[in-house]
């Protein structure tokens, strides 16, 4: 008989961990919603990040670079829709130059492949509607169809004999370890808390009291007023430590604009609340002045970043911590978590004997 692993949370991270453990354990994946990946895993920009932004020694940098490569292998093996678009990051005027260069250097330090400085003549010819002073290009960035990705993971879990319990809400983690759920108790040899926005609540039930998740809401608008086949990002937003309001192509003619940033009190608030005027104001420096009035925006969707705090101080990095023995918590798996998921799973599986 194999030992039992109980995983709370059927997002992209929990699903990859379940697959990584499926040979060694009888795996139970507990998901409170009807389908896998209905929360943050499908409410994001759908960008396979390269690893440009994060401090070199961070888990984010390591797992993003590794996760980018592992995800590409996964997408090609299981035919998940993926476009290797690359991405531009732009400096909008001279004052932003130094930071753009700092990002470029940081990407090289992190081992990000295929980084390039861009000829502005060519850039302006291709994107006459964008205002940019200079730009860098990341060739290893791409876009993913996150819903299709989750469907593929669901089918693989089934093929690998993972017992997916859904809808089934974990109520807490008790000593043993065991998971109390609204459908009874699961006795396990190891428990993994991959509950995304709710990972703090599961952690507290296991005696890890000092982590809190306060969602940082991100709204997206859509537009079809222009065509775009490469994501275009401004420099990061330092107020909230996010990547800034970017333009992202999709698998349809729609271009996504977002995500905005607002601390929000409810983890399940997915109503678009950012006024359209705020989007137009943020885009004023990105688009050529004559072009902006031609852009027609409509409501897209919203996602909540699982922003974690330890004793009130923001956790800049992913937190992966065992407490008590046999119970692993993944807290604050915000961006680049979609990209990092297979690398996080490989790491967690290596910690579990
Ligand atoms: C606006 C936004 C943009 C982003 N853009 C990108 C991007 O472009 N690229 C990128 O790499 N990353 C991006 N991210 C980050 C990425 O989406 C997340 O890091 C990733 O989806 C986290 O996956 P997860 O499985 O940890 O969490 P989730 O997807 O939230 O999964 C957790 C699951 O746990 C379940 N759950 C919670 N509590 C319980 C319970 N008590 N019982 C049972 N089930 C429970 C939930 O229902 C949920 O399905 C973005 C995030 C946001 C919000």
Image (tube, rainbow, N blue to C red):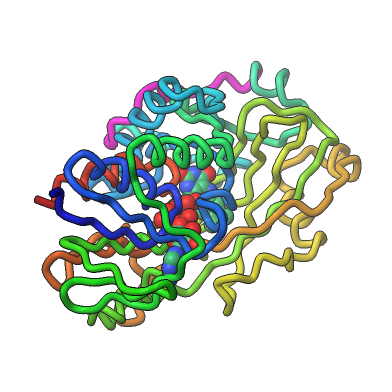
Whether residue 257 sits left or right of residue 175 in the image: it is right
Residue 264, percent across and down? 59, 75
* Residue range of the region highlighted in magenta in the rendering: 109-121
Q: How many numbered marks does the figure carry?
A: 0
Above or below 8: residue 174:
below
Residue 54, percent across and down? 35, 47
Above or below 213: residue 67:
above
The question of residue 111 being in magenta is answered with yes
Residue 271, percent across and down? 72, 66
Whether residue 288 sits left or right of residue 265 in the image: it is right
Above or below 178: residue 305:
above
Residue that protrudes farthest toward the right in the picture: 294
**Relative to the observer, which residue lies in front, 266 or 55?**
266
Could you tell me if residue 236 is visible in this image?
no
Could you tell me if residue 108 is visible in this image?
yes
**Relative to the observer, which residue lies in front, 11 or 217?**
11
Above or below 137: residue 323:
below
User: Which residue is pictured at 55% across the width and 58% down the height?
Assistant: 39
User: Which residue is pictured at 37% across the width and 52% down the height?
Assistant: 14
Q: Quadrant of residue 282?
A: bottom right
**Relative to the observer, which residue lies in front, 256 or 191?**
191
The question of residue 32 being in magenta is answered with no
Residue that protrudes farthest toward the front in the picture: 1
Whether residue 93 sits left or right of residue 238 in the image: it is right
User: Which residue is pictured at 34% across the width and 28% down the height?
Assistant: 69
Residue 335, percent across and down? 45, 51
User: Which residue is pictured at 30% across the width and 74% down the height?
Assistant: 203
């Amino acid at each position: 008989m194999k030992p039992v692993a109980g995983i709370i949370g059927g997002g992209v991270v929990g699903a990859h961990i379940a697959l990584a453990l499926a040979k060694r354990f009888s795996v139970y994946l507990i998901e409170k919603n009807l389908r896998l990946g209905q929360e943050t895993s499908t409410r994001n920009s759908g960008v396979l990040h390269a690893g440009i932004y994060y401090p070199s020694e961070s888990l984010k940098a390591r797992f993003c670079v590794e996760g980018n490569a592992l995800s590409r292998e996964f997408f090609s093996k299981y035919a998940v829709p993926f476009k290797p678009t690359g991405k531009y990051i732009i400096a909008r005027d001279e004052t932003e130059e130094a930071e753009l260069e700092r990002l470029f250097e940081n990407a090289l330090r992190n081992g990000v492949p295929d980084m390039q400085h861009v000829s502005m003549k060519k850039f302006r010819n291709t994107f006459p509607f964008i205002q940019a002073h200079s730009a860098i290009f990341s060739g290893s960035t791409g876009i993913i169809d996150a819903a299709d990705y989750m469907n593929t993971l669901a089918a693989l879990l089934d093929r690998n004999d993972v017992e997916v319990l859904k809808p089934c809400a974990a109520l807490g983690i008790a000593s043993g370890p065991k998971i109390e759920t609204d459908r009874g108790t699961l006795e396990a040899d190891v428990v993994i808390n991959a509950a995304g926005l709710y990972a703090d609540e599961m952690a507290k039930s296991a005696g890890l009291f000092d982590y809190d998740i306060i969602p940082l809401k991100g709204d997206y608008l859509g537009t079809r007023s222009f065509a775009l086949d490469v994501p275009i990002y401004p420099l990061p937003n330092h107020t909230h430590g996010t990547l800034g309001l970017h333009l992202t192509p999709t698998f349809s003619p729609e271009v996504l604009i977002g995500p905005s940033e607002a601390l929000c009190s409810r983890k399940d608030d997915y109503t678009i609340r950012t006024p359209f005027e705020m989007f137009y104001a943020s885009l004023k420096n990105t688009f050529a002045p004559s072009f902006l009035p031609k852009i027609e925006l409509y409501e897209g969707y919203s996602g909540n970043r699982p922003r974690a705090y330890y004793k009130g101080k923001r956790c800049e990095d992913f937190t992966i911590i065992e407490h008590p023995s046999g119970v692993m918590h993944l807290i604050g798996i915000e961006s680049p978590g979609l990209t990092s998921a297979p690398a996080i799973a490989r790491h967690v599986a290596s910690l579990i004997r």
